[in-house]
Image (cartoon, rainbow, N blue to C red):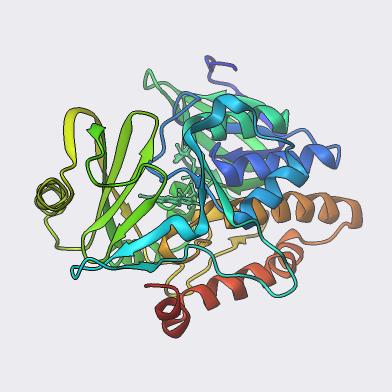
Amino acid sequence: MEHAANASTEHHEVIIIGAGPAGAATAKSLRDAGIEPLLIEKKKVPRYKCCGGVLFGEAQLVVREHFGEIPPQVYCDPPTIAAEDIVAYRDDGSYVPWSFELPRPGLELPTTYLNLWREKFDAWLVERSGARLLDGCGFAGFLRKADPITISCRLLDGAHRRFACAYLVGADGGASAVRSHLDAAYRALAEKGMGHYQAFHLHDAGGLDRHRWYVFPRRGGVLFKDDLAVITAVGRKGTKLREHFEEFVRYLGKRFGVRLTGFHRDEGFFQNSMAATGAFVLGHGNILLVGEAAGFLYFHAEGIASALTSGLAAGRAIARARREGRAVLPIYAELVQAEMEHTRLCWNREVMRSHGG
Ligand SMILES: Cc1cc2nc3c(=O)[nH]c(=O)nc-3n(C[C@H](O)[C@H](O)[C@H](O)COP(=O)(O)OP(=O)(O)OC[C@H]3O[C@@H](n4cnc5c(N)ncnc54)[C@H](O)[C@@H]3O)c2cc1C
């Protein structure tokens, strides 16, 4: 890992902004094609990400094929959650199945999901990509959008640094700074999403089974990781999320005897409505967007699989564009066509209803 210092312009063939799953997958497929990208991440790695940290079936297949076996230290206790142990609780005391994954025709997906620490998982993906990482360095804006693409980044101490590249990949998540400089409609989308408020508590699980993941429609969810209960409250814009969350915690205590004995971390998170509305933006010229920055996210906020798939596609598209002397964007658009269709299908109202939403 490196820390930036001087003010001259540093040149690279490809720069990737964001070291989440989408950025790591882009880096991996570029390196597999013999291209050495620079991966720029605004936080220090390993970095925290507000997430359930559950790796569903499709994501597992992609990780195994491109990154290998996940090392034991990345897993939480319990290390796995069976698909049938993800349940929605009804006020009448019954449980109904709740699905986070829409099967794909012809693809047999694992139905035992992996319970991971996201920050460790993402750091491992980056390490396995083998790419050069510059962390503590945030994309701040474009100085030029072509010939060459030139960007300005801000370091943690407030200093600025300039980079130039032939291709730039925005893998900077659902609140993408790269996209906000490319897509005038982006801010309006951010007005329409869902708020998530997630907190980690030391717990006494009471009547809840630590091996299950509980969804409480209209309230939120509970998932167990080591000695922590991860409690997420969800609400539309305008919901007072903190109050909603506290009410949910009181409900868990009263209904199930869950006791929270200390506070580990808490934060709010806003997820925009790009995926739900099919508002994909794949990029502009030699600038590509991948993962949540592009609009890839399946229903119930499952996003690691499509972040990986779109990242791999972007890396392949750049390699092919260079090799064949072609424009990169049409190649990338073709490679992610099926991913866009699957995402649209996920957010179809009927499909969502049949999977618990
Ligand atoms: C509450 C919640 C629970 C979820 N649970 C699950 C789950 O259990 N399983 C699942 O599959 N999905 C889950 N998701 C969705 C999943 O977290 C995301 O879809 C996924 O992380 C998207 O990957 P990404 O690589 O596109 O972006 P991210 O993982 O968000 O990575 C983007 C990276 O870019 C960096 N970055 C941002 N801005 C800049 C900048 N200006 N310069 C440089 N770097 C920058 C960020 O620090 C970050 O490291 C959940 C989401 C939420 C909100």
Q: Nearer the viewer, residue 146 or 321?
A: 321
- As drawn, is 47 to the left or to the right of 65? left
* Residue at 54% across, 78% down: 345
- As drawn, is 92 to the left or to the right of 171? left
Residue 5, percent across and down? 52, 14
- As drawn, is 211 to the left or to the right of 106? left
Q: Is residue 256 above or below residue 265?
A: below
* Residue at 13% across, 54% down: 244
Q: Is residue 161 above or below residue 176?
A: above
- As drawn, is 170 to the left or to the right of 108? left
Residue 8, percent across and down? 59, 21
Residue 134, percent across and down? 57, 24
Image quarter of residue 89: bottom left
Judge whether residue 146 can be spotted in this image.
no
Image quarter of residue 95: bottom left
On-image quarter of the N terminus? top right
* Residue at 55% across, 49% down: 113
Could you tell me how many numbered marks the image carries? 0
Q: Nearer the viewer, residue 341 or 327?
A: 341
Q: Nearer the viewer, residue 145 or 82?
A: 82
* Residue at 13% across, 45% down: 253
